Image: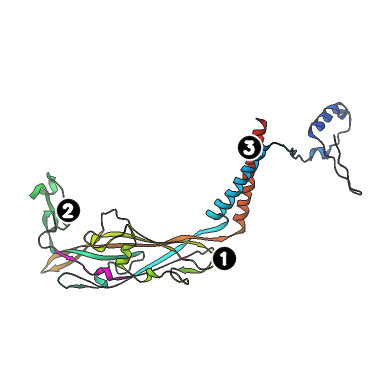
Amino acid sequence: RSELGAMPGTELQRVVDEDDDVGAARGSGARGSRTSGAWDWNKICAYHTNRVVRIQDANVGYLYWGIVTLVVLYIQIVVFHIEGRHTLQEPGLGAVITKFKGKGFTADGKAFDAPDLRYPIIEPAGAFLMTRRVTMKGQKMGTCIDWDSPEHCPCGDHGACGADNYCEVKTWCPSLGDGNVANPGPPPGAVVEDILGLEDAVLMIVAGIGFPSIGKKFHVAGSSPDSSTLHKHISVAQLLELADPPLKLQDVAKTGSIIAVNFFWNCDLSWISDCEPSFSVKRVDDGTGFVQKRAKKSTVQGVETRDAVYMYGLRLIVDSSGIGRQISLVPIVIQLGSCLALVQLASMAADFLMVR
């Protein structure tokens, strides 16, 4: 049992080696049974601390300090610098609007303006630009092959076997559907109009985002000094050239295409309030194209008729999303705590090597 000296006027409690204390307790067990029943609060409320031993071994030191160095570098480089976990992070609330200005023409000189080319005219998340139109006018209810969902013979009770071993059923005739609009070709009477000159039509895309928990500012793409404003006045040809892979309008005009336009924001608002997004364009329809179907009904001399329209074109899907970051004390404390916890791995590994 060892005791620490005390400064003049100050008395320190005893610092006792645990093994000596256990031996002393056993030696005085008999005497303790004959003493009074008073409790020793110094022993009951004793504080236990680990003994520190300095091991003069290079291999153990290399292992310990090597793990400590790796942990510190991991926290500093990966956690703080790359992943930014020392910041408060919040997904943004984005908004976009796309405007179109331009005209198209058919080979016979027929003109199409924005109300003709866009459907719907106002769309929250993008735009549709028509590049080809197939129209079957004057359809009437009758019995013919339904090319929207053609069936092979035998037909059962709902139809009769007709030409080319297909069932003739009750539908709008002459039928215009996915089965005959492109291959073997539109039926007789269908009007096919290819829209030319859309390469020079202009798209005006406005994109923005806000991070409510970080700040009240709503960031608009292209509003910062020296930022790119190409998306605010970009031609259809320029937009398709930026796609991955690059496209030309004549390559997708007859089948249509789905083009994704993404504005991704990665904003660190700790020291500055301005932020600009990265801009990407990609074709996402895997070559299947895009078409819209419309129908306009009317009554002529008491007979209901319908004009069926297939509209091929560019379906632009515009999106604005991202993450906002701002340095915060709470995540910094959490990451420093995890660093101290990981450092204990170095002690565990060194102890394991020492006992081996």
| 96 sits to left or right of 83 | left
The kind of residue on which mark 1 rests is Trp
- The first of marks 2 and 3 along the sequence is 2
The kind of residue on which mark 3 rests is Ala
| 55 sits to left or right of 238 | right
Q: In the rendered view, would you say 286 is above or below 92?
A: above
- Neighbour class for label 3 at 10 Å: few (<14), some, many (≥20)? some
Q: Is residue 87 visible?
A: yes
Give the residue number, with chain letter if any, for mark 2. Answer: 179
- The first of marks 1 and 3 along the sequence is 1
Distance of label 1 from label 3 (alpha carbons): 41 Å
- Neighbour class for label 2 at 10 Å: few (<14), some, many (≥20)? some
Q: Tell me what residue is drawn at x 18 percent, y 69 percent.
A: 106
Point out which mark residue 349 bears: 3
Give the residue number, with chain letter if any, for mark 1. Answer: 271
**Nearer-the-camera pick, 356 or 169:** 356
